Amino acid sequence: MFWLLFLLIACAAAVVSSARLCSAAVAAAREPEGAGAGRRLSLYEVAFLSGGPQRVGDLALVAMDRQRRLLLAHTGWVTVVDPEGRNELERSVIAAIGPRGQSPVPPVRAALAAAAPVRALADRLVAAGLAVPAAARTNVAAAVRQVWAATGLVLLMGVAALLIVPPDSGRGQAAAWFALPLLLTLGCLAIAHAEVHPYTRWASPAGQRLLGRIEAPRPRPARRVGGQSGDGDGDGDGRGDGDGRGGGEHAMLVALALHGASALPDPELRSAFKAHWGH
């Protein structure tokens, strides 16, 4: 009956890790009462809740490119056209590109993800109950890894137990007992995949509800003439100017904020980031 010791270890690992995952998931789902009620998200808030700080930087780069204030080349370089930023985020973009006015996209994108305006945006969304705090995301991811480790331990203990159980002593019964902690861990992982996937999601349940109300308009195919956009200008947040111009630009920016680089209709923009964004 020495295999019972292995069973106790497997059960303890399964119960402890599953309990931690449940606790972390509940903490991540906790939100202030009335969070998001009557709230309308800006494009940058949509970008953060959909894809985190990197998506905010992506949106800033593309928005400034469409306003002809940056040039995103299909070679993966970004060049400053207008060195005067209109807000803190745009000034962070220009500072990340550097004094030479030109830089590869990857270091600019990395610098923007850690820029002070992006951190301030994240703090505001967390305070409003729309974004999951960084600590909660970390706890959920760590808890998921612990459950995976417990699953491996259960399998290891089960194999070890079957090796020491004589064939005429009921290996089937021992295997059945080890199936219980295995079902517990696999069940928790399946629920986590459905309820808290991806495990480091940015939006809280309230934020997810707001995102679910956004319908991304279908962007018109963009044409670039001489490195410039063939569509009308948009204002500072990528919205149209009210008379029909810039509607395609706004549709593209909404799609980018929600879905990332793969939603860009401009083939040159996709080429500019395809090698670096990993979408």
Image (cartoon, helix red, strand yellow):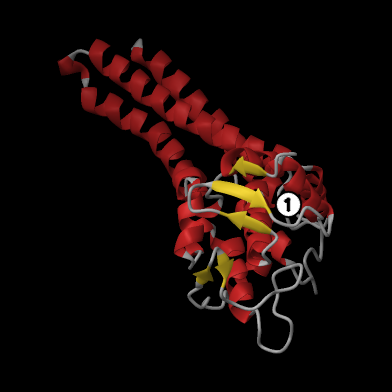
Residue at (63% x, 45% y) in the render:
25
- Residue farthest along the left direction in this orientation: 168
- Foreground residue among 80 and 56: 80
Residue 278 visible, this angle = yes
Residue 102 higher or lower than 178, as above or below = below
Residue 139 percent location from the top left of the image: 65, 35
The N terminus appears in which quarter of the rendering?
top left
Residue at (79% x, 71% y) in the render:
39
Residue 222 percent location from the top left of the image: 51, 73
Alpha-carbon neighbours of circle 1 within 10 Å: few (<14), some, or many (≥20)? some
Q: Which amino acid does label 1 sit on?
A: Arg
At mark 1, the secondary structure is loop
Residue 131 percent location from the top left of the image: 72, 53
- Foreground residue among 110 and 269: 269
Number of disc labels: 1
| Figure quadrant of residue 180 | top left
Residue at (65% x, 55% y) in the render:
61
In the image, taking residue 158 as reference, residue 128 lies left or right, namely right
Q: Please give the residue where the numbered disc 1 appears in the rendered image.
A: 30
Residue 164 higher or lower than 114, as above or below = above
Residue 194 higher or lower than 247, as above or below = above
In the image, taking residue 75 as reference, residue 256 lies left or right, namely right
Residue 197 percent location from the top left of the image: 52, 50
- Foreground residue among 259 and 194: 259
